[in-house]
Amino acid sequence: MKKLLVGFAMLAVAVTAQAQGDAISKFFTKYQNDETFSQVNMSSKMFSLMANLEIENPEDQEIVNMISKLKGLRILAKEEARNSRELYKEALSMIPTKEFEELMTVRDKDKDMKFFIKESGGKISELVMIAGGNEEFMLLSLFGEIDLKQVSKISKKMNIDGLEQLEKIKDKKN
């Protein structure tokens, strides 16, 4: 009987953890068919293909090595959004605070950004960035084995606004 109760308890914990992890996915799903949003969805296959590129520059090779550890990237963005502040608040409300730790907040006169990480065993497994401005909104989720300094370098090369803010974070031990 004890084994059965322990089994049900473990199942309940697993289901709860899965439901929390799906909160961000629910936000993406809610707006994926809305044509006013731009979307990017990169799979682990895309990252593995990028990792197979022949690179001569040592700095670029370092980035390619980091890319090979990524499992996916999702971006949902909306420009000229009259409801950008509401989207920002809605996305923030969907972050499971038991699972994610707030890493950094950046507030500008016309834009707010928050960065969250999910850590497991001392390794960052997911980075979430939520940005909302006067007329723009963006939600970014990067998952896999993440090195924040490398993410900042990649964002500069790929021209992903906001992630350059990660350079301001002091070393976080992986």
Image: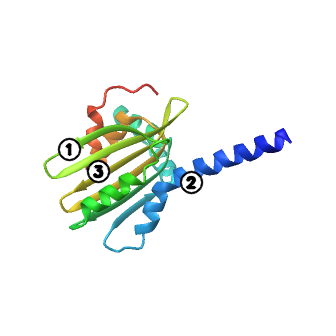
Residue kind at label 1, given as amino acid type: Arg
Question: Residue 45, position in %: x, y?
Answer: 53, 54
Q: Counting residues from the N terminus, which is met first, the one under dot 1 or under dot 3?
A: 1
Of 69 and 136, the residue lying toward us: 136
Which of discs 1 and 3 lies nearer the camera? The answer is 1
**Element under disc 3:** loop
Of 32 and 96, the residue lying toward us: 96
Name the residue that disc number 3 marks.
160
Tag shown at residue 107:
1
Residue positioned 42% across, 35% down in the render: 147
Spatial CA distance of label 1 from label 2 is 30 Å
Other residues around mark 3 within 10 Å, as few (<14) / some (14–19) / many (≥20): few
Can residue 56 be seen in the rendering of this structure?
Answer: no
Residue 11 lies left or right of residue 44; in this view the side is right
Residue positioned 45% across, 43% down in the render: 97
Question: Residue 53, position in %: x, y?
Answer: 45, 46
